Amino acid sequence: MAGPPANANSSSWVVDMENMLQHTDPSAEAARWKKSSIYRVPERIKHQTNKADAYRPQLVSLGPFHHGKRHLLPMEEHKRRAVLHLVKRARVPLRDFVASVEKMADELMDAYDGLDEWWCEAGKGRFVEVMLTDGCFLLEMMRTRRLVLKGKPLKDYAPNDPVFSIHGFYFLRPDIQSDMILMENQLPLLVLQKISAVARGTSSSAEDINEMVLRFLDCPLDEGMGKLGLHPLELYHKCFRDPQPNVSRLDREREDTVPSAWELREAGTRFKMSATKRVCDIDFEDGVLRMPLLEVYDETEKNYLNMMAFELLHRYAGNDVTDYIIFMDNIINSERDVALLRSKGLIKSGLGSDMEVAELFNTLSKGAVMSPFCKLLDVQQKMNEHCRKPWNKWRASFEHTYLSNPWVFISLVAAVVLLVATLMQTIYSVMPFYTKN
């Protein structure tokens, strides 16, 4: 069957392109890009580390991107129960909750970059249901945490409830935490704020919502949380960022190589822990490298990968975590470097071996690029300058050889004393001869 005339296709294309011309204004485009905060991770990023599962939820879906996946369906029943319990406890009609979410449906849809058109058109009502259901589920899980830690009973749930109980808190919470930090599995915190406001009958502050989420994720609470977070991942990511970043000079020469932790030790570098846990709280002054404690567990790789994806895809996320991962990859070349940092109290590992930790950081940074403004570039330059000075290596070699072991030091002192005594004896033996002559 012959297709439509070529001129018909081209004229339709021209009409479509002309309709889009009004959206090419820089201010209009800037407003469009600013709305998105939740993204699908591109396949090229997933293939770089061969860790596609690191971006997929394992227990519960949040938002539309993974909704309805077969392996996540068992949790849907418990999510619906969360809605019923929250609504019943609030004594507010369910339609009031639905109406509150419907009012901001367009704003919530804009938060999802690349959302399928079905959700925006025929499935708009379904989208509202997903937002409300997932929001109630998170609020009920956070309530469960609060009551369990305070030792209070969850009166409106059965004691043997598989999810909303002491058992559910201790055994399911780690997996729920992990799924809440995935880039593709985010729920706007605006949903939680609106649902909470309807349930309480009064507006919920941004600070209250932020605090609930951070406590559930076991994150430290920072000052200045007056602005509502975009979603759980963004709040989690902020815990690692530098609140007042220091930028490096663009005119500074880049270092081709960076000394490893072992090479720094050989050059006499001392290692100390930073005052905070922020990843960019790293500095090098007077031969001392200060860096935050690095805790490595089974979920560490997944968490870092999703934060790095967020930094790559969201224009306002900064580059702190990616810069840190590249820096750690630079100073960790082998298990020997990990063992050194661990002996200095700078790495706490829950993995099987130091080799696993080294391989973790050597693969995490694959394809990543350090920001040209990153202050860690200055730190690396100072480290290189320190290692290039021969005196630092000679002094470090002397300290490692003779001062690290007390018995070796005592032997050295004894040898020096013996040498001085022998020299003095020789002088006193020769002196009479020259004096007589």
Image (cartoon, helix red, strand yellow):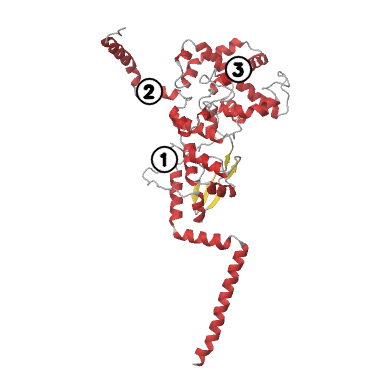
**Any mark on residue 29, and which?**
2
Question: Which is more toward the observer, 147 or 435?
Answer: 435
Image-based side of 230 in relation to 250, left or right: right
**Within 10 angstroms of label 1, few (less than 14), some, or many (20 or more) residues?**
some
Question: Which is more toward the observer, 176 or 193?
Answer: 176
Q: Residue 371 lies in what quarter of the image? A: top left
**Within 10 angstroms of label 3, few (less than 14), some, or many (20 or more) residues?**
some
The residue positioned 53% from the left and 30% from the top of the image is 54
Question: Which is more toward the observer, 89 or 405?
Answer: 405
Q: Gap in Å between the C-alphas at discs 2 and 3?
A: 37 Å
Q: Is label 2 in contact with label 1 (beta carbons under 8 Å)?
A: no
Position of residue 104 relative to residue 360, above or below, is above
Where residue 2 appears, as percent x and y from the top left, is: 30, 7
Image-based side of 25 in relation to 55, left or right: left
Q: Which residue is mark 3?
A: 76
Q: Gap in Å between the C-alphas at discs 3 and 1?
A: 45 Å
Q: Gap in Å between the C-alphas at discs 2 and 1?
A: 26 Å
Give, as a three-letter code, the residue at label 1.
Phe
**Comparing labels 3 and 1, the label whose residue is closer to the camera:** 3
Secondary structure state at the residue bearing disc 2: helix
**Any mark on residue 391, and which?**
none
